[in-house]
Image (spheres, helix red, strand yellow):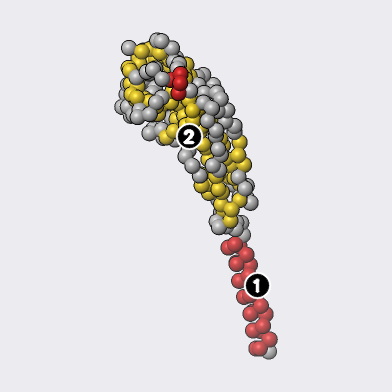
Amino acid sequence: MKRLLYIPIFLLFITLFSACDDKETEGISRVTFFPILTMSGDEIIVLNVGDTYTEAGVTATTGENEIDVTIDGNVNATVPGIYQINYVAFNEDGFSATALRQVIVQDLASIAGTDFTGTYKRTFYGTPKNGGFSEWVAGDVAGLYKVNDVGGVDGAGYEYDLTVYQVAADKFVMPVQPNEIGGTIFASSTAGGSSPDVIDMTATGYIWSVKGAGYGTNPRTFEKQ
């Protein structure tokens, strides 16, 4: 009789152990490898009008496996401006990774002899009309400028340089680039612009909308001093 009692007790122990094991693993997902994109070539490419753009490509991997990359965007190297090439890849669980390449097309012939350097005062931004100053300094290649305090905020934390490219005699672009306040920053010609575009430089100055953390999207008017 004693031996018969041990059997159901043992079976009960196995059943309880199995039930506990199922509870411990309930709702636990399997491991997923997020996509990693590796870009060939530079993130910003500068061409002269008439040059040929060659797509260098991006490689995407999940763990040790290479996966497909979707490329979206076109470059018209006959028209000065800025063009974006977007890359995206998905893993088998639907998680994505993205990368961005920006292609800037300059008309070097029309840029020759022009100069955007100088001090520009912000004279209008939404309700407050007057603001601070932006200083434009020429870079080491034609059409490249470093602009300090792009918002004309004249306040602590905004006095840093960002890169601007002149693309024609009276036009320039500010591509997406790291923002020292956080995230990224770029400039567009309108408040509703969702990506960089061509901005006009007139004899008196320019109007642009700065898109980035710490900046409102209202157009900012700057006049050359």
Image depth: mark 2 or mark 1 in front: 2
Q: 94 left or right of 48?
A: right
CA distance separating discs 2 and 1? 65 Å
The residue identified by callout 2 is: 45
Question: Which residue lies most toward the top here?
Answer: 204
Upstream in the sequence, badge 2 or badge 1?
1
Measuring 54% from the left and 42% from the top, which residue is drawn there? Answer: 56
Measuring 60% from the left and 45% from the top, which residue is drawn there? Answer: 69
Measuring 56% from the left and 39% from the top, which residue is drawn there? Answer: 55
Residue 137, percent from left and from top: 33, 24
Residue 31, percent from left and from top: 57, 57
For the C terminus, the quadrant is: top left
Residue 115, percent from left and from top: 37, 18
The residue identified by callout 1 is: 15
Quarter holding residue 205: top left
Q: Would residue 174 be seen by someone viewing this image from the given angle?
A: yes
Dot 2: element: strand
Q: Would residue 124 be seen by someone viewing this image from the given angle?
A: no
Q: Amino acid at mark 1?
A: Thr
Q: Is residue 11 above or below residue 172?
A: below
Residue 165, percent from left and from top: 43, 26
Q: Is residue 44 above or below residue 68?
A: above
Closer-to-camera residue (100/3): 100
Quarter holding residue 5: bottom right
Quarter holding residue 32: bottom right
Q: Residues within 10 Å of mark 2 (few under 14, many from 20)?
A: some
